[in-house]
Amino acid sequence: MSRFCLQIFLLLSSFFYSGPKYGVQKIWLFSKVQYFGNVPVNPNGNQLKGYQFTLTCYLKICKKLESPDWQTAYFNGNRYKVNILPITQDSVIVGTLKNTHSIIVIKDSSGTKLVQLILTKQTNIHNVIMVGFELEGTLNNNNVHLESNECVVELSPSIMP
């Protein structure tokens, strides 16, 4: 009897399982501080902030499924504009880990492709408690939403020219 119940459970769970949401199989988040080589100044000669914080997202998605047009991301109470950059290679070197200086390489697998989401900070969202990372976009003229609790990996800082 228990074997029969197990078979029914497996059959039903495989029937109701639709796979990764919107074909997204994996999400990676990376943060990096980029220091300006020359310290910028405003028109009055006062020094401006000499660095910028960047947040980058990589998605491993199924090649067979249509992917949403991601437009907005939310992270740590900030709203970001999303620019989608398809990756044509089967792997990408993301950078080096801040603490160990190990090189991070992301590879796709059979039936998947990689996409980079370049995130540009737009505004702070006040009085909102956000946990994790959220993406919003459209697919077939419908609004779609994807959440992730992936940890952000901090990359080694760099100096911009």
Image (tube, grey):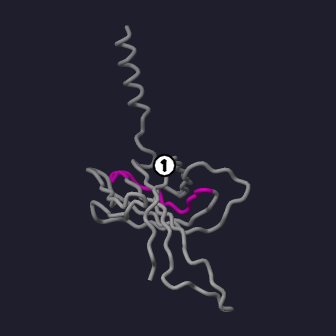
Q: Position of residue 48 (x, y in %)?
A: 62, 81
Q: Amino acid at mark 1?
A: Glu
Q: Position of residue 70 (x, y in %)?
A: 50, 60
Identify the residue at horizontal 50%, vertical 75% (top origin): 35
Q: Position of residue 149 (x, y in %)?
A: 52, 46
* Mark 1, other Cα within 10 Å: few <14 / some 14–19 / many ≥20: few
Identify the residue at horizontal 33%, vertical 64% (top origin): 93
Residue 143 quadrant: bottom right
Would you place residue 32 above or below residue 18 in this image?
below
Q: Does 132 appear in magenta?
A: no
State which quarter of the image contains the C terminus.
Answer: bottom left
Residue closest to the eye, 27 or 52: 52
In the image, farthest residue toward the right: 127
Residue at the spot of label 1: 150
In the image, farthest residue toward the front: 99
Q: Which residues are magenta?
A: 61-76
Would you place residue 91 above or below residue 65 in this image?
below
In the image, farthest residue toward the top: 1
The tally of labels here is 1
Identify the residue at horizontal 45%, vertical 49% (top origin): 22
